[in-house]
Image: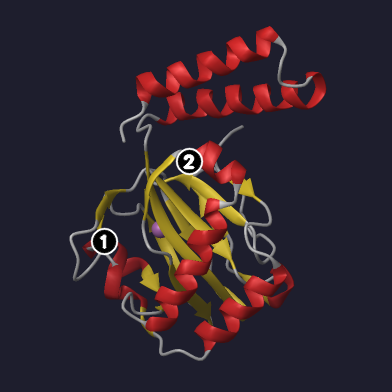
Amino acid sequence: MTMPLVIPGVLTRDQVTTIRRTIEAAEWIDGNATSGAQSALAKRNRQLPEESPAAREMGGVILDALGKAGLFIAAALPLKVFPPMFNRYAGGEAFGMHVDNAIRLRRGSDFRLRSDLSATVFLCDPDEYDGGELISEGGAPIKLPAGDMILYPASTLHRVSPVTRGERIASFFWIQSMVRDGSARKMLLDLDLAIQSLVASQGNDDPAIVALTGVYHNLLRRWADC
Ligand code: NI
């Protein structure tokens, strides 16, 4: 498994509809409210204020869904997830090349995290807008169905191309992983998925599978901070 990683179907269609209906009716502000100095120059979009009741409530729906998304948990090994935020792009709005802030603070609280991973959950389908691809340096443009999530290292340079038709609405947030090192995290994911595949074909009482599961947990114990 390699990054960026697509995690399909994090949200159901009904959840997407509920979230869109709720946030579209809320009050939006200039997206630069959360930017660092460099990214403020590059960013043209709108977002919901962090303290917006709609953002908090619908962010909660997304956090609940993440808790049930096995591939997300296996890949991110999340220690902390920043409360999901929401943005929208239309009429040529875009976000130029930037890197996300390393430390994210939640205004008005003592919540802070180190951003190891960045996530976007798409809330519009690709045919609803033109442009709006998420483009990482050297990577293919990414544009996913509503309800799907893309997970990528927060250390990567990335941008959102101009939205030239329709509107792109998404949720975005950051994750601090229990395993800081991305290559260690990748090995744990690969091992986890290989074990799950063996369990599916052999059952879970094969002594070799039990031993491999032990290795997985002992590596996690070695590498995780929580
Ligand atoms: Ni970004």
Give the quadrant of the N terminus: top right
Q: Is residue 201 placed above or below 90 in the rendered structure?
A: above
**Residue placed at 44% from the left, 82% from the top?**
54
How busy is the neighbourhood of tag 1: few (under 14 within 10 Å), some, or many (20 plus)? few
Residue extending furthest toward the right: 201
The amino acid at mark 1 is: Gln
Q: Is residue 221 placed above or below 50 in the rendered structure?
A: above
Image-quadrant location for residue 191: top right
* Disc 1: residue Cβ within 8 A of ligand 1's nearest atom: no
In the picture of the structure, the residue carrying the numbered disc 2 is 76
179 vs 195, nearest the viewer: 195
The amino acid at mark 2 is: Ala
**Residue placed at 31% from the left, 78% from the top?**
51
Disc 2 element? helix
Q: Which mark is residue 2?
A: none
* Disc 2: residue Cβ within 8 A of ligand 1's nearest atom: no
**Residue placed at 77% from the left, 21% from the top?**
203
Q: Is residue 54 left or right of residue 192?
A: left
Image location of residue 113, percent across then percent down: 27, 50
In the picture of the structure, the residue carrying the numbered disc 1 is 38
Image location of residue 109, percent across then percent down: 19, 66
Q: How many marks?
A: 2
Q: Is residue 195 placed above or below 21 in the rendered structure?
A: above
208 vs 112, nearest the viewer: 208
Q: Is residue 201 visible?
A: yes
